[in-house]
Image: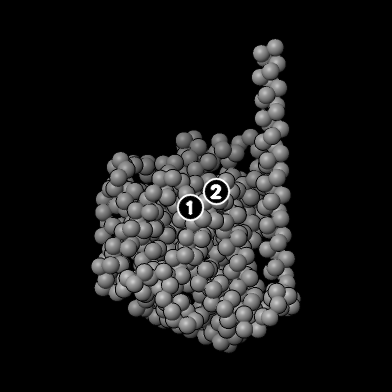
């Protein structure tokens, strides 16, 4: 109780409240602009947050992270263009409702489902806090290494159809992290006697290049676009209560969001598709899905907004980020010497509670803002894409240069920007590179620390949590190979069927 009161006191500071408001409203605006998204905004803001108090900097980033998906639903529903990548599924049922003249109803359902999912996940997080505080101290170097290894495996396997590419990109991220001075004996690795490589590749420079600069290049080389959505008439307050009619779907979707958010590397997309599939299979009108079904819209929005709260669990308890945005937040923790993991719950529980309360407040601020500012946000959607590209490009270079006043950093960021553009054009994921850098660094440090006490391979699994993690890794790999084998058999059966049909047609 003392920790909770201290957390409230910490959050009640004027600078924290201002940061919370800026992050919440700014996240909605950024989410509503197609082509920007939370990853780009957080990447640009990261250098600025390093000079702020940790609670202030993290509050701004949390505000953007938690509220961008609210804003992303607006263009997804009105102009069939998702504001953020995770709002893509919202277009399936949101835009058909708009074409039917039900734009206001669709937006009200999306906002209420997002709010329900967000609050649901934060409450789950708060209820799990005592359990986390008990379990976290039992994680030593071996356990954190194995948890990070499990996270990398899940990141790779989560990219269905691109597992090999994701694995290669994770390996590339681990390689990038190993350049420069190694963390134990401070010997140089992969520097080739180049002084500019001695300090390695800074995570923020790589993040700004891969996410922000690549998006700026993409907006600049693509055709200029200025959408013109129709304004929304009337108040949405009367439509908010309609969520109660679909409370089963909203609860199940939020549950999927929490479960998937807790697992590193899985995230919003898996939660969305699982909840959408569940909603369709249990619906009395499954044929309406994709044609403007309120259940489909609710399943999508509740699931993706339940993920941010749950994604903070592995970050805070173990210091292991589950996806790119929490990896960026981890750098803010490290800069201020606030190390997420077992010690955080023991020594700074008030800080943890302050973050939880901030996440609840930001959902309330966003909901109030959206109810009265939706028509204002439709003006934001109309910003020309090439103008956005120029703004993102300028802010990105300012952010990179401000880190160390280094032109070399700007050149490195430009190189990663071009790489990011190529990967986006090839439809390959960027997230594995960042998680490879972050989790690779954690794995190396923890493995080398734990090897002092490890004499045989069995010493790695002689503690219960380590043994459970190893079993989980084996189980995940076996399930993946089983899936591959089943898909291979299905492809062969399909080819045999096509061959038989072709033979019978020739006969």
Query: Closer to the camera, 348 or 302?
Result: 348
230 lies left or right of 185: left
Residue drawn where x is 62% and y is 84% of the image: 452
Discs 2, 1 touching: Cβ within 8 Å: yes
Residue drawn where x is 70% and y is 26% of the image: 497
Q: Secondary structure at mark 2?
A: loop
The tag earlier along the polypeptide, 2 or 1, is 2
Where is 396 relative to 221, above or below?
Answer: below
Where is 14 relative to 497, above or below?
Answer: below
- Residue 120, image x, y percentages: 60, 63
Residue 18 visible from this viewpoint: no
173 lies left or right of 405: right
Query: Closer to the camera, 32 or 162?
Result: 162
The residue carrying mark 1 is 429
Tell me if mark 2 has few (under 14), some (14-19) or many (20+) residues whose alpha carbon lies within 10 angstroms of its own.
some
Determine which of the numbered discs, if any, sits on residue 162 in the image. 2
Tell me if mark 1 has few (under 14), some (14-19) or many (20+) residues whose alpha carbon lies within 10 angstroms of its own.
some
Q: How is the image coloured?
A: one colour
Q: Give the distance between the C-alpha atoms of the residues marked 2 and 1, in whole angstroms.
A: 9 Å
């Amino acid at each position: 109780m003392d920790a909770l009161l201290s957390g409230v006191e910490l959050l009640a500071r004027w600078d924290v409240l201002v940061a919370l408001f800026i992050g919440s409203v700014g996240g909605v605006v950024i989410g509503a602009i197609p082509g920007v998204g939370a990853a780009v905004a957080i990447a640009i803001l990261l250098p600025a947050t390093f000079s702020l108090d940790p609670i202030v900097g993290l509050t701004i980033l949390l505000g953007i992270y938690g509220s961008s998906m609210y804003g992303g639903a607006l263009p997804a529903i009105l102009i069939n263009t998702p504001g953020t990548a995770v709002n893509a599924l919202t277009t399936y049922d949101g835009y058909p409702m708009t074409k039917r003249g039900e734009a206001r109803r669709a937006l009200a359902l999306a906002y209420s489902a997002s709010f329900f999912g967000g609050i649901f996940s934060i409450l789950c997080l708060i209820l799990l806090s005592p359990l986390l505080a008990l379990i976290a101290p039992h994680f030593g170097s071996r356990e954190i290494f194995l948890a990070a290894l499990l996270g990398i495996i899940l990141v790779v396997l989560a990219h269905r159809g691109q597992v090999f590419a994701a694995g290669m990109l994770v390996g590339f991220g681990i390689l990038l992290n190993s350049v420069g001075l190694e963390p134990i004996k401070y010997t140089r690795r992969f520097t080739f006697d180049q002084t500019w490589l001695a300090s390695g590749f800074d995570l923020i420079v790589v993040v700004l290049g891969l996410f922000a600069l690549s998006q700026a290049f993409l907006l600049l080389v693509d055709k200029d676009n200025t959408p013109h959505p129709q304004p929304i008439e009337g108040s949405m307050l009367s439509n908010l209560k309609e969520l109660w009619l679909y409370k089963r779907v909203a609860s199940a979707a939020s549950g999927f969001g929490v479960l998937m958010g807790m697992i590193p590397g899985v995230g919003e997309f898996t939660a969305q598709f699982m909840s959408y599939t569940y909603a369709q299979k249990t619906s009395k009108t499954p044929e309406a899905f994709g044609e403007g079904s309120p259940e489909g819209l609710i399943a999508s929005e509740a699931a993706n907004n339940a993920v941010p709260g749950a994604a903070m669990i592995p970050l805070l308890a173990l210091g292991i980020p589950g996806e790119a945005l929490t990896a960026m937040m981890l750098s803010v923790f490290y800069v201020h010497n606030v190390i997420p993991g077992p010690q955080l719950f023991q020594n700074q529980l008030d800080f943890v509670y302050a973050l939880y309360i901030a996440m609840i407040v930001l959902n309330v601020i966003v909901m109030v803002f959206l109810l009265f500012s939706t028509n204002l946000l439709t003006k934001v959607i109309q910003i020309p894409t090439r103008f956005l590209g120029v703004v993102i490009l300028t802010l990105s270079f300012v952010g990179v240069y401000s880190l160390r006043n280094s032109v070399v950093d700007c050149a490195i960021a430009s190189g990663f920007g071009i790489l990011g553009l190529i990967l986006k054009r090839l439809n390959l994921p960027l997230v594995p590179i960042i998680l490879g850098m972050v989790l690779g660094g954690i794995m190396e440090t923890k493995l080398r620390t734990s090897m002092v006490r490890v004499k045989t391979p069995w010493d790695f699994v002689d503690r219960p949590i380590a043994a459970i993690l190893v079993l989980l890794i084996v189980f995940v790999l076996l399930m993946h190979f089983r899936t591959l084998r089943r898909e291979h058999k299905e492809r062969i059966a399909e080819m045999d069927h096509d061959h038989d049909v072709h033979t019978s047609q020739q006969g």
